[in-house]
Image: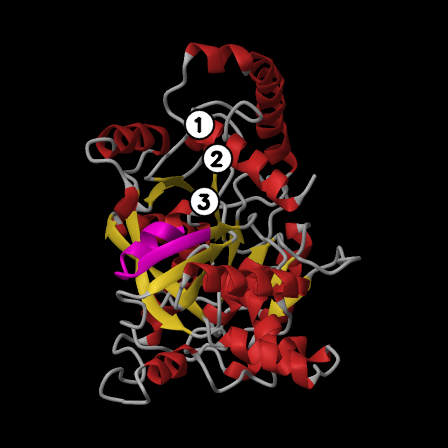
Amino acid sequence: MTFLERRAVRNFISQLWMRRDEGLLTKIVLFPLWVVSLFVAVGVRLRRALEPRKAHRAGVPVISVGNVTVGGTGKTPVTIELARRLTGKYGRRAAILSRGYGRQKKDVPIEPVVVSDGENVLTTAAEGGDEPVLMARALPGVPVVVCPDRTAAAALAIGKFGAQVLLLDDGFQHLKLARDLDIVLTDGSNPVGNGFLMPRGPLREPFGAIRHAGLAWITRMERSQPGEMEALAARLEKMTGRPPVFSATEVSELTDVSGTRLDEELLREKKVLLASGLGRPETFRTTAESLGCLIAGERQFDDHHVFEAGDVRGLIQKADELGADFIAVTAKDAVKLAPLLTVDGGPKAGPEAVEKEKNGGDPEKHEAGQPAESPVENSEVLNSSAPTASAPVENSSATAAGAESAPSAVQTAERSAGFARFVVVHIRLKIISGEEVLDEAIRQVLP
């Protein structure tokens, strides 16, 4: 099966899962999957009932961020927000523990891998995973450790870095490590899809499992349907005992793949090809539309897609066919694209140089990008990942990938041409309501 065929199958399944209205014929055809989902439900309920009894206590507070559905619900921006809150507002030494999805290297070690020691990003996305590297770059001062065994990761974070509180990324179903607060996220644009358990639908476990959480968080309110959130909020409050937190995402900055900030108006009224590898790629289109760009086309890859040189060439070719000025990518994907597009820290002819050249070199027609006025600590990133302004360029995946053999002159020219076309869209989290509830929940678990 070719890539396009696999992509078509996955898109078809995703559309079935996320549909809220199903016809009788669809229900009949999918009846066998519903039967399978009944056995899955029994299994997850037994696991939820038995495993917490033997869960390991880390010795410091553990806050988990997770969800009950497959696909992205915005866990990465929420985890970043919590880490900043714990270190800034509460003055605690926080560390993030992640499974490390998307690691590309063969023979990935089962022992903990330190993605960041709080001072430097020590691995590439291939070694540490795209989202862990993204979080590491966004959070100077916060160690990030990846390991399938979160108990071992916790021991390392506490013993080596003196962590006083642990953030468990995507940890709601990871029951081997006891937690003091479970925060469960729900996507405001489509909370449960068709409402069925896998493989009939997108639920990892029954929606009622949220009653085991201490706080619910409704994300992506910018894509929610008017009038639907009231009933959902009431249901979540009844299950957790607290009103949910509401948040939205917004663009924080544009950069090239090496992390250099670009003019925030660079994409306005420009033809853009969107490229993303996300759990819910439709969210990136909404983000891009907010920039005022003209979307010429989209290329959707699988979540945690391992980008190769052929992908880059294919994107550039597609952009040429569509007459697109730029290729917009998520920050999560930029972590993996950077080594394919940069040489020794990145060529100097970035996206703004291309735009300036189009205007005949007249600086009055297009000003060079200036650093954003907002403080760096407010800059966030979408389920996605190039280095933020707070992360030094020498820690970029371009440099981390320096172990590669030196590229030829032709490869260097190709990379330079590609580098000039890619623009990274970073997002940040904006809490709309429930901040007091969030702080109350955090205070209750901190010593």
Q: Which residues are magenta?
A: 284-298
Residue at x 35%, y 48% (from the top left corner): 441
Name the N-terminal-most of marks 2 and 3.
2
Name of the residue lying farthest toward the left: 227
> In which quadrant of the rendered image does the N terminus lie?
top right
Residue at image coords 57%, 44%: 178
Helix, strand or loop at label 2? It is loop
**Is residue 342 in view from this perspective?**
no
- In the rendered image, residue 259, in percent from the top left (x then y), is placed at 46, 76
Other-residue count near label 3 (Cα within 10 Å), few / some / many at <14 / 14–19 / ≥20: some
Label ID, residue 68: 2
Kindly identify which residue carries mark 3: 280
Residue at image location 55% in from the left, 49% down from the top: 303
Secondary structure under badge 3? loop
> Would you name the residue on which mark 1 appears?
207
Q: Is residue 66 left or right of residue 55?
A: left
Q: Earlier in the sequence, mark 1 or mark 3?
A: 1
Labelled pair 1, 2 in contact (Cβ < 8 Å): yes
Please state which amino acid type lies under the numbered disc 2.
Val
Q: Is 194 situated above or below 375?
A: above
- At 43% across and 59% down in the image, what residue appears? 322
Residues under labels 1 and 2: Cα distance? 7 Å
Q: CA distance from mark 1 to mark 3?
A: 19 Å
Residue 283: in sight, yes or no?
A: yes
Per the image, is 397 magenta?
no
Q: Nearer the viewer, residue 170 or 260?
A: 260
